[in-house]
Image: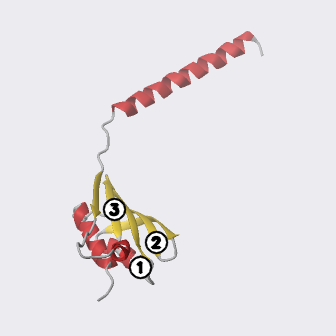
Amino acid sequence: MDEVSVLENAIIYLKYLQERVEILEEQARKPVVHVKKSQLVVDDVGSSSSEQQSIPSIEARVCNKHVLFRIHCEKRKGVLVKILGEIEELNLDVVNTSVVPFGSSSLDITIIAEKEKDFSLEVKEIVQNLYAVLQPAA
């Protein structure tokens, strides 16, 4: 390699780095996205520890037009179908779902959904609706 080609490559690389710095500085100036989070925890005073473990844990976070759900619930037949059905009834489109067994009797479910145009609920209302779906039939 001669000196001219080394200098050309160095100039090209410096221009690339300058563009990269400009892009990163622009991204740093953008406002931070605020995430709304809601979690429903039920604490019955008279319940035993085994009963408290079977209560579902539901967490929902909203970022722009997406909603992230983290659900830890009892493993029952059809529970995922009920959850996904309720999410779609709330005018949310399911984008991604992950279900992992946790122990022998519970599930750890992560769902990413996108808000539809006519979506109007608060995060707390979404969590309450999902909590109602996860309650065992009496």
Pinpoint residue 118: horizontal percent, then vertical percent: 24, 65
Residue 110 relative to residue 52: left or right: right
Secondary structure of the residue carrying tag 2 is strand
Pinpoint residue 127: horizontal percent, then vertical percent: 28, 67
Q: Quadrant of the C terminus?
A: bottom left
Pointer 1 with pointer 2, Cβ within 8 A? yes
Q: Residue at x 63, y 17 (%)?
A: 10
Compare marks 3 and 2 and give the one earlier in the sequence.
3
Residue for badge 3: 59
Label 3 CA crowd tier, 10 Å (few <14, some 14–19, many 20+)? many
Q: Is residue 65 visible?
A: no
Pinpoint residue 76: horizontal percent, then vertical percent: 44, 82
Compare marks 1 and 2 and give the one earlier in the sequence.
1
Mark 2 belongs to which amino acid?
Leu
- Considering only vertical position in the picture, is 119 above or below 5? below
Residue 66 relative to residue 7: left or right: left
Q: Is residue 80 visible?
A: yes
Residue for badge 2: 107
Residue for badge 1: 79
Pointer 3 with pointer 2, Cβ within 8 A? no
